[in-house]
Image: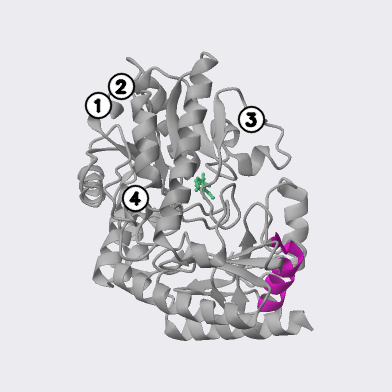
């Protein structure tokens, strides 16, 4: 319906028709969208908000070039993928150009599906069964990926950690097992040392699993852990982990579902951030890929892709349909035409400086972590103990929405991290407004 609708009526229908466990932002007073345009969302009364939540609408809500590409393809053909379409191969070629060490693409429809398929590929290729994931990780909502997600199974899910899943410490030098002081965090040598300890833990997990008669098929991680707390692992951590995992016959899967397509600025993919020669065996991607149109993919090496499933083959009704491919290629064209990698990088640097300045005047900000347009503000009760302040984080996001026209979400294992991940068109004015609003809200909250 295009008619304006009363939010209470919609919420009441929702109660009657939609599962009560389906999550909403701002659950006490959910946000109803009447319109979206680039980095802005409008509520049911037409009020405008800067959207710092929607990392899926990557190049901007309803970006006209993406809308046009999707509409054109939708009006032309939407056939399933057992018919041949040049859009599929064109799209694969464009994706592969961003991942020079990989050569084969399998398309799916969601991040969860992509990770589930990546696990199956890893198992079929290696002949092993188990997976290593990192603490607080989230890899998706289907049964296998829920079982690989401490973010869910440590937080009340009915699906518990199975025997085939091993959890490695999160390589987080602020809140993890091997912590550094604020001064040490700025020291590259100390960071590398901490990274080595974290990667050694992975090796020990593999050895322990083998002593128990188990075999590791894959190590799964995000290159920048998102739901799990905006954590950037130290340089060389992944390279060392990859060495250990491969020595024991496993493969490395990097989940770029949240972090890909220039989210981190400068590079297309977060695992390329450190430029340290690290190359995964499998990369999964989703969310920003279609700017909101459902599409995802697994990118890997031919020998791994071809090991899949004996004689049954891979078929996925919608995965890689021409409309999805048109969406992906238009997103990639906008990223190029609008120079969004450079923009994301430049805005990220400015945002980082502004947030660090904010940290100087607000003791409740324990840590600021991020790169490109992907930042986390770790709120604490006490800077010394680093005790997370979930209550403050939730109060801040409500106040930002209520009085400042800013949509922001809190996440992480303690829900105390404010996550800034807007569409990449987020600009200098938006930075000024959001940082100013945060400054005022944190000041009010301190009183
Ligand atoms: N991996 C990561 C890192 C994610 O953040 C998500 C979604 N939040 C998924 C996988 C699952 O993606 P989807 O919801 O598209 O299935």
Q: CA distance from mark 4 to mark 1?
A: 28 Å
Residue that badge 4 annotates = 323
Q: Nearer the viewer, mark 4 or mark 1?
A: 1
Between 28 and 241, the residue placed more toward the observer is: 241
Instruction: Determine whether the residue tagged by mark 4 lies in a helix, strand or loop.
Output: helix
Q: CA distance from mark 1 to mark 2?
A: 6 Å
Residue that badge 3 annotates = 161
Disc on the earlier residue, 4 or 1: 1
Q: Position of residue 197 (x, y in %)?
A: 48, 43
Residue that badge 2 annotates = 307
Say few, some or many: other residues with alpha carbon within 10 Å of mark 4 (under 14 / 14 to 19 / 20 or more): many
Q: Is residue 146 above or below residue 38?
A: above
Q: CA distance from mark 2 to mark 3?
A: 27 Å
Instruction: Determine whether the residue tagged by mark 1 lies in a helix, strand or loop.
Output: helix
Q: Is residue 139 above or below residue 74?
A: above
* Helix, strand or loop for the magenta stretch, by majority: helix
């Amino acid at each position: 319906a295009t008619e304006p609708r009363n939010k209470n009526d919609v919420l009441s229908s929702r109660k009657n028709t939609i599962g009560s466990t389906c999550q909403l932002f701002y659950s006490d007073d959910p946000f109803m969208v009447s319109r979206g345009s680039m980095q802005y969302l409008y509520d049911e009364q037409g009020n405008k908000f800067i959207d710092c939540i929607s990392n899926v609408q990557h190049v901007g809500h309803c970006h006209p070039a993406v809308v046009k590409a999707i509409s054109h393809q939708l009006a032309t053909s939407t056939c399933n993928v057992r018919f041949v379409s040049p859009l599929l191969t064109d799209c694969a070629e464009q994706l592969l150009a961003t991942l020079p060490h990989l050569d084969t693409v399998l398309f799916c429809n969601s991040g969860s599906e992509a990770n589930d398929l990546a696990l199956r590929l890893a198992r079929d290729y290696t002949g092993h069964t188990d997976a290593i994931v990192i603490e607080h990780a989230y890899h998706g909502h289907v049964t296998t990926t829920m079982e690989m997600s401490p973010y869910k199974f440590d937080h009340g899910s009915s699906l518990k950690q199975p025997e085939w899943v091993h959890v490695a410490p999160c390589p987080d030098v602020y809140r993890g097992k091997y912590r550094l002081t604020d001064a040490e965090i700025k020291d590259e040598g100390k960071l590398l040392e901490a990274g080595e300890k974290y990667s050694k833990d992975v090796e020990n997990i593999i050895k322990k699993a083998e002593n128990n008669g188990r075999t590791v098929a894959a190590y799964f991680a995000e290159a920048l852990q998102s739901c799990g707390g905006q954590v950037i692992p130290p340089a060389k951590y992944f390279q060392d982990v990859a060495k250990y995992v491969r020595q024991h016959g496993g493969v490395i899967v990097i989940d770029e579902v949240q972090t890909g397509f220039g989210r981190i600025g400068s590079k297309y993919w977060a695992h390329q951030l450190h430029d340290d020669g690290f190359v995964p065996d499998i990369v999964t991607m989703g969310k920003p890929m279609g700017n909101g149109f459902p599409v995802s993919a697994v990118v890997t090496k031919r020998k791994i892709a071809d090991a899949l499933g004996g004689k049954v083959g891979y078929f996925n009704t919608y995965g890689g349909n021409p409309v999805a491919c048109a969406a992906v290629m238009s997103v990639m064209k906008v990223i190029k035409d609008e120079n969004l990698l450079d923009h994301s990088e430049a805005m990220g640097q400015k945002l980082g400086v502004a947030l660090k300045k904010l940290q100087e005047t607000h003791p409740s900000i324990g840590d600021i972590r991020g790169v490109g347009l992907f930042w986390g503000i770790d709120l604490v009760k006490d800077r010394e103990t680093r005790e997370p302040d979930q209550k403050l984080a939730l109060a801040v996001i409500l106040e930002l929405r209520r009085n400042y026209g800013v949509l922001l979400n809190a996440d992480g294992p303690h829900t105390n991290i404010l996550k800034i991940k807007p569409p990449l068109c987020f600009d200098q004015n938006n930075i000024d407004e959001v940082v100013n609003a945060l400054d005022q809200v944190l000041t009010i909250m301190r009183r």
